[in-house]
Amino acid sequence: MKNHICFVLGAGASIPYGYPSGKGLISKIIENFNLRKDVNSAQQNISDLRSLNIDIEEIKDLVDSLRHSGAISIDQLLENRPKLVKVGKFAIVQALLNVSEILRPKDDHWYEYIWNLMCKYNNVESFNSKKYRFITFNYDLTFETYLANVLTRFYGIDIDRASEMIKDMNIIHIHGKLGNYPWIEDNSSYILPNNPSKEAENIYSKALGIKIIHEMNGNNSVYDDAFNILNHY
């Protein structure tokens, strides 16, 4: 791995680490609002979104559309249903918030494989983090979390230095990401409606990071960055 390298992490790359596929996410969202399967959980999920000014009919429309539209991902559906974008983003975050992350899976631990290619023959001073670029189609931050863990332990550096090295890698999330890195304090400020629950507040804050392609018309910096990287690496 002597040359500059760009890794593209496609949809499904996070499955070994506990996150669902595109179809799996659709199933999880539908399940979250299924009153017949778990009435208490579904009622709480509905209540959280209602406290964020989401109408019950919007939730019904989203679930019905996910069931019967033939879409293989919620992103695909929301591209064609702009009126469902707000409830869709909240539903995405709600479905992913309670995922039990697996940072060391027994099988298919490809983060470890990539890391060992990156760190081979390098001490911390010779490790060139600017050599690597990552473009991911996933919302989660498991890869960045894994890198933070291995950088601090492999080289014995502090989290601030590890964060700078990860920043140098310019990891681009095409569809946005679930909030900030876990080790960075979130000092974002925003106006919330109706004094929502802590869970609803968490959903709201993380949904701000989710991006739908048509929302970026005229402001395609993420795509421009990705194309520039692919053209140069």
Image: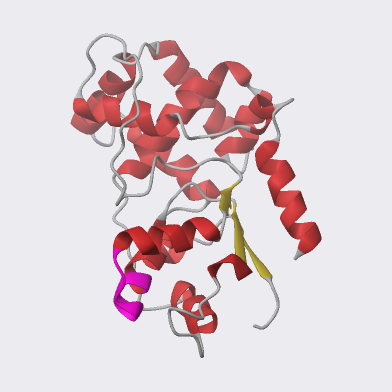
In the image, farthest residue toward the right: 231
Q: How is the image coloured?
A: secondary structure
Q: Tell me: 142 left or right of 127.
A: left
**Who is closer to the viewer here, 88 or 127?**
127
Q: How many labels does the image show?
A: 0
Q: Can residue 31 be seen in this view?
A: no
Q: Where is residue 59 in the image (x, y as percent from the top left)?
A: 43, 20
What residue is at 53 percent from the left and 59 percent from the top?
A: 168
Q: Would residue 8 be counted in the magenta stretch?
A: no
Q: Tell me: 80 left or right of 52.
A: right
**Quadrant of the image containing the C terminus:** bottom right
Q: Is residue 135 above or below residue 152?
A: above
- Magenta span: predominant SS is helix
In the image, farthest residue toward the bottom: 121
Q: Tell me: 107 left or right of 129.
A: left
Q: Where is residue 44 in the image (x, y as percent from the top left)?
A: 23, 26
Q: Position of residue 101 (x, y in %)?
A: 32, 58
Q: In this view, does 12 lie above or below 81?
A: below
Q: Can residue 209 be seen in this view?
A: yes
What residue is at 46 percent from the left and 63 percent from the top?
A: 165
Q: Where is residue 230 in the image (x, y as percent from the top left)?
A: 75, 58
Q: Tell me: 209 left or right of 217.
A: left
Q: Quadrant of residue 123?
A: bottom left
Q: Is residue 46 above or below residue 56?
A: below
**Magenta-drawn segment:** 151-158
**Quadrant of the image containing the N terminus:** bottom right
Q: In which quarter of the image is residue 19?
A: bottom left
**Who is closer to the viewer here, 189 or 138?**
189
